[in-house]
Each structure stands twice: as structure tokens, then as C-alpha cells.
Image: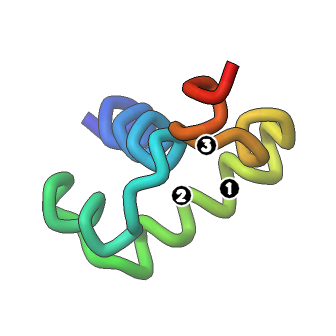
Amino acid sequence: MRRLRAEMIKLFAGFGWTQERIARIADMSQPAVSKQVAKHAVADPAASTSCGACWRRT
């Protein structure tokens, strides 16, 4: 279940969703979501610089 939540957070953050909205959907606290987002940003710098709107421009 933790792995699924981590993947959800990574996916939704990539689409530009707010941490508050992700927390509501994942049934987690906002600080927990923030920690996961920071963890993935350090682990995968390329993914943290892209947003959901970036791919639409091309």
C-alpha cells in the first residue's frame, strides 16, 4: 500500500497537483505528502523539474 501511495504522489505531483489535494485523495496528512514529494525530488531530479503543462506546449 505504501508503494502505491508513493507512486500516486509522484504521478499527481508530476501533473502539478497541490500537496493539499494529493493528501486529501491519498488519505494522508499534508506534511506526509510533502515528505514524499521531497524524497522523490531528490531521488529523480529530472522528474521534479517537469510539470503537467510542460508536455502540452510541444
Q: Is residue 19 above or below residue 49?
A: below
Residue 37 is drawn in which quadrant?
Answer: bottom right
Mark 1 or mark 3, whichever is nearer to me: 3
Please provide percent x and percent y for residue 31.
43, 81
What residue is at 55 percent from the left and 39 percent from the top? 53
| Image quadrant containing the C terminus | top right
Q: Reading the chain from its start, which is encountered first: label 1 or label 3?
A: 1
What residue is at 61 percent from the left and 43 percent from the top? 51
Please provide percent x and percent y for residue 52.
52, 38
Horizontal side, residue 27 vs residue 38: left or right? left
- What residue is disc 1 on? 39
Residue 3 is drawn in which quadrant?
Answer: top left
| Image quadrant containing the N terminus | top left
Q: Which mark is residue 51?
A: 3
3D distance between C-alphas at marks 2 and 3: 17 Å
Mark 2 or mark 3, whichever is nearer to me: 3
Q: Nearer the viewer, residue 50 or 6?
A: 50
Q: Is residue 55 above or below residue 6?
A: above
3D distance between C-alphas at marks 1 and 3: 17 Å
